[in-house]
Every structure is written in structure tokens, then in C-alpha cells.
Amino acid sequence: MRQFWTGLLVLLALALPGSLRAADQPPVFPGGGLVGMQPPGRMVEANGVAGFEDRAAKATILLLDVPLDAFDTVAKDFTDEALATQGITVTARRDLKLDAGGGSGTLLTGTQTVGTVTLRKWIALVRTDKAAALATVQYPDLAADLYPDAVVEAALRSIVFRRPPTQEEQMAALPFTLALPEGYRIVKVFGPGTVLLTKGASNEMAGSGQPYFIVSVGQGDVREDQRESFAKRAIASVPGVKELRVERGGPLRIGGMPGSEIVATALDVHSDKDMKVAQWISFGRTGFIRMIGVAPAEGFDATFDEMRALRDGVQLR
């Protein structure tokens, strides 16, 4: 299960395409999430993701809620070697103590090379006794004068947590509504645009032998000639499975909008059990809805029909 949460955090992190604020400024909780901070410099709340951005400087901060029971596993996955596979070179690693709430954790600093651009990279993994978060900061070298080290670190030390909203409050804040087929229930809502569902009593997704379904909203216009390659790249990041192989796929209309469907085979990351994965993406003018269904290969036809009903029950507000 912990590997599942780590994979889902990575999936969510991929969604993110001056002077320090006054110390007494109240924290901002982007996307109405549980994790907040005092954003540095000219950063403002980003649209569609739990974070902040300074578009002119190409600087971003992403804040992710980390399940407490997965914290230790997530921390172990942030090794220098693992980050190097993503082009990140860690130059320093030290303890970080939060200014409020008694929280602490680890702060990594370094660089990341993306094409010909070198980015400054900060990764903070912090927790209190009741909540945990992962914060990533990045900006190009050219923005270093706007976001000096002391300013960025002070912003990360300002991370705070607030009382979790009820599930009803979280669902009301989503940009879409759901119609649930019989037997399906909501497991967790992530930030402002992602929800995890399952059919069955267990919250243990990987290795549980029960189906799960993820709905998420992404920002950005994906051109018609890019949609096929976009969908193929996206399905490679499905959490909880490995050795994924596409069986079939192609364009189709979803709720009257242009879309994509891909069906693939895979193995459960824990049990090696044969699984099936279905991914649907509905493309709009300024964003897209991605829907992922994962279930055991045995009896998948019936489950596939249920997941199509789930897909058709997702409606933007």
C-alpha cells in the first residue's frame, strides 16, 4: 500500500507543469488543501494544482499531502540515486524544522537539468504528529536573485497544516461531480482535483484484489495531434501496477467531448497478479479529465462495464 501511495504522489507531482512575504502574513492553503505556507516573492496561488507560481520568473512550488502511514517509505524513496534518474543532482541534505506546529523533516537542495535549462531544486519532506507534506520548489538560475536561498528556506519553514475537511466538504470543492455505481465508494480526495475510489471494504489498493478508480483534472490545452502520445505517456504512470503493456486504444467521444481510451495489461506491484488497466482522457479547451480504472484480469469484462459507467458519471461543475 505504501508503494501505491508513493506512486500516486509521483503521478500527482507530474501535474505541475522578489522579497519574502511579511512574517505575520497568514498562510495560504492552495486549492483549499490541508497544507499551507507563506508563498515567497511574487508567487501567487496556481490554477488547478495545489501550489504557487510566478509565471514571469518560471518559478513554482507544489504542495502535496502525504499519508502519515506512508511517510517513512516516501522518505526512503528520495535517495540521491533515485532523484538522479529524474535528472536531479542533490548538493545538500539537512534537517528542517518548521516555524510552527512542532513539525520537522528533511530538506534537499540541488539542481535539475531539463533540456538546456538548469533549474534550482528544493525538496522538503516534513511532518507533525498528525499530518505530513511534500513540497517541491523549482526555478531557473536566472530567477535566483528574486528567490535567494534564505527566502526559499524561510517559505518552506512556514509550512503549516490545518484540520482535514470532511469528505463531503472535499467532494463539494472538486471541479466535477461523480455518479457512483453500486458498490463503489470514495477512499480519499487529493487536493483540488483528484479522487480515489474502490469497490470493496479494504483501503489497501495494491495486492487487495479489488478494483480501484482514479479521477483527476489537469490544466493545459492538448492539441489534437498530441493527444495520442499524451495518453500513452500518461498511462505509463498508473500507480500500483508494473510491466504495463497496451492492448488496444484509440480516440472516442466522452460526454460529447474529444477523448482517448486505452486498455492495457499489467501486474500488481505486490502480488504479481494479472491486472487490467483502462484509461480515459476527455480533452477540453483549457484542460482535461483523466480517469483510470485498475482491476484483476479475471472477470474484467464485468468490471469494465462498471468503470465505463463511472467514466460517464463524471461531470464538470
Image (cartoon, rainbow, N blue to C red):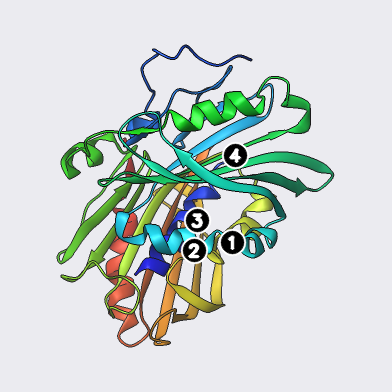
Mark 3 in CB contact with mark 1 (< 8 angstroms): no
Q: Which residue lies under the disc numbered 2? A: 76
Nearer-the-camera pick, 148 or 228: 148
Residue type beneath disc 4 = Asp
The label on residue 11 is: 3
In the rendered image, the quadrant that contains the N terminus is: bottom left
Foreground mark, 3 or 2, reads: 2
Answer with mark 3 or mark 1, whichever residue precedes in sequence: 3
Nearer-the-camera pick, 254 or 7: 7
Report whether residue 54 is seen: no
Residue type beneath disc 2 = Lys
Secondary structure of the residue carrying numbered label 4 = loop
Q: Residue 280: percent from the left, percent from the top?
A: 46, 59
Say few, some or many: other residues with alpha carbon within 10 Å of mark 4 (under 14 / 14 to 19 / 20 or more): some
User: How far apart in space, not on screen, are marks 3 and 2 (Cα)?
Assistant: 18 Å
Q: Residue 181: percent from the left, percent from the top?
A: 19, 62
**To which quarter of the image does residue 203 belong?**
bottom left
Secondary structure of the residue carrying numbered label 1 = loop
User: How far apart in space, not on screen, are marks 2 and 1 (Cα)?
Assistant: 6 Å
User: How far apart in space, not on screen, are marks 1 and 4 (Cα)?
Assistant: 34 Å
Mark 2 in CB contact with mark 1 (< 8 angstroms): yes
Nearer-the-camera pick, 136 or 205: 136
Foreground mark, 1 or 4, reads: 1
Rendered view: 100 above or below 312: above
Which residue appears at 59% of the width and 39% of the height? 221
Q: Is residue 256 left or right of residue 93?
A: left
Answer with mark 4 or mark 3, whichever residue precedes in sequence: 3
Q: Residue 20: percent from the left, percent from the top?
A: 55, 16
Answer with mark 3 or mark 2, whichever residue precedes in sequence: 3
Q: Is residue 233 left or right of residue 72?
A: right
